[in-house]
Amino acid sequence: EDKVVQSPLSLVVHEGDTVTLNCSYEVTNFRSLLWYKQEKKAPTFLFMLTSSGIEKKSGRLSSILDKKELFSILNITATQTGDSAIYLCAVEPGNTGTASKLTFGTGTRLQVTL
Amino acid sequence: KAGVTQTPRYLIKTRGQQVTLSCSPISGHRSVSWYQQTPGQGLQFLFEYFSETQRNKGNFPGRFSGRQFSNSRSEMNVSTLELGDSALYLCASSDPPSGGATGELFFGEGSRLTVL
């Protein structure tokens, strides 16, 4: 069965800090790994990673995938209070010719304080 | 472009009742997926519909069912509600690329179900 484990479960940082969120996974026939941000209810897409070692970057957020060690990290630099949210990691298995479904981790709850 | 719309946003039911939740995807999106979110389990995949056909199903009992209409709108139904069905039910739409990949999911605000 596919599995995604995120760490830490929660953390509190001060505005301006840099944080690293971790995601390890076990999946049959890997296709992609995705990061989502959930502030209130609707998760919003951050990144999709398919290849090892290629960093995806969007503003202060960046992410990288290691397909050999089966993990990904999400970095947030110069954190702001608006970064407070639950960060979800998900993996998509690849089944040739059929649709796939996402397996999510339970998320990391980030709180950024002033 | 309007986002994913889910109705109702909140509902309270009692054990044994049944409930139907509705999801209208982003215009042009052909795939609708449903997820259950609970504090302990996180988001768990229920099922996915594409062009009115169920393409994939998660590990939920048969009390959970769904369908998709020709306009891509989707409904999910839970019969014989149990206390453990209390959760946030999220719908997501996507326009999958070729090869069966899921593609980026666009989530709705969810339907918060409380079972008493």
Image (spheres, rainbow, N blue to C red):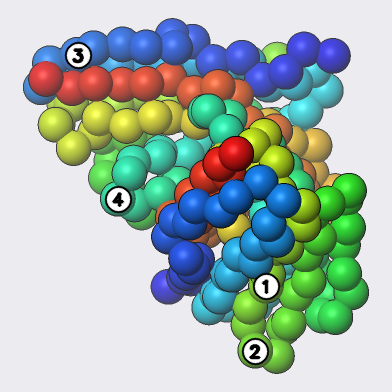
Nearer to us: label 3 or label 1: 1
Q: Amino acid at mark 1?
A: Ser
Q: What residue do we see at 24% from left, 33% from top?
A: B85
Q: CA distance from mark 4 to mark 3?
A: 21 Å
Q: Label 2, on which residue? A: A69
* Residue on which disc 1 sits: A72
- Rate crowding at label 4 as few (under 14), some (14 to 19) or many (20 or more) other CA atoms within 10 Å: few
| Quadrant in which the C terminus of chain B is drawn | top left
Q: Circle 4 marks a residue in which chain?
A: B
User: Which residue in the protein does label 4 denote?
Assistant: B40
Q: Secondary structure at mark 4?
A: loop
**Percent position of residue A44, x then y:** 68, 37
Foreground of the two, A31 or B37: B37
Which image quarter is the N terminus of chain B in? top right
Query: Which residue lies at the image location 72% right of the left edge and 83% below the top edge?
Result: A67
Judge from the rendering whether residue B111 lies leftward or rightward of residue B38; answer left or right: right
Report the disc number at residue B13: 3
Nearer the observer, A83 or B53: A83
